[in-house]
Image (tube, rainbow, N blue to C red):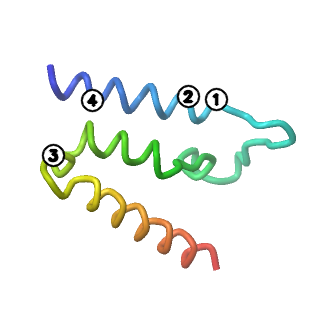
Amino acid sequence: MFFFFHQTLLGFVRDELLTQVRPGERHDHSVQPYENYQVDYDLFKLIFLEVSPWGQGAQAEDLAARIFRVSQVLRLLSSH
């Protein structure tokens, strides 16, 4: 039941992000679908704290912030 709930939650978030199109913005169909959207820190933290096994405990928010920063650095490095 726990796994099903989280899979459903992640599916819902993914679908919502993929269907959001901001004014003047289009999805680039030449790239992978997961590259067409970005997750800001607040959404990442929410998902991390609810879904990840590391999202529990005293250091969970600090860990979420560090993982998010690393992912942003890696994304910037891979785009150059």
- Under circle 1, the secondary element is helix
| Percent position of residue 63, x then y | 26, 61
- Percent across and percent down for residue 8 are 34, 23
Marks 3 and 1, how far apart at CA: 30 Å
Labelled pair 3, 2 in contact (Cβ < 8 Å): no
**Which residue is the site of mark 3?**
56
Label 1 near label 2: C-beta < 8 Å? Answer: yes
Residue 19, numbered label: 1
Residue that mark 4 sits on: 6
Cα distance in 3D space between marks 3 and 4: 15 Å
Q: Which amino acid does the dot numbered 4 rest on? A: His
| Tag 3 near tag 1, CB within 8 Å | no
The earlier-in-sequence mark between 2 and 4 is: 4
Q: CA distance from mark 4 to mark 1?
A: 20 Å
* Amino acid on which the number 1 mark rests in the picture: Thr
Q: Secondary structure at mark 4?
A: helix
Which structural element holds mark 3?
loop
Give the alpha-carbon distance from disc 2 to disc 4, as whole Å. 15 Å
Answer left or right for 28 relative to 13.
Answer: right
Q: CA distance from mark 2 to mark 1?
A: 5 Å
Which circle marks residue 30 in the picture?
A: none
* Quadrant assignment, res 9: top left
Q: Compared with residue 50, is residue 30 higher up or lower down, i.e. above or below?
A: below
Q: Which residue is mark 2?
A: 16
Give me the residue at 27% from left, 43% from top: 49
Query: How would you rate the neighbour count of disc 3 (Cα within 10 Å): few for under 14, some for 14-19, many for 20 or more?
Result: few
Q: Is residue 32 above or below residue 67?
A: above
Mark 1, Cα crowd under 10 Å, few <14 / some 14-19 / many 20+, is: few
Marks 3 and 2: which is nearer the front? 3
Q: Is residue 22 left or right of residue 15?
A: right
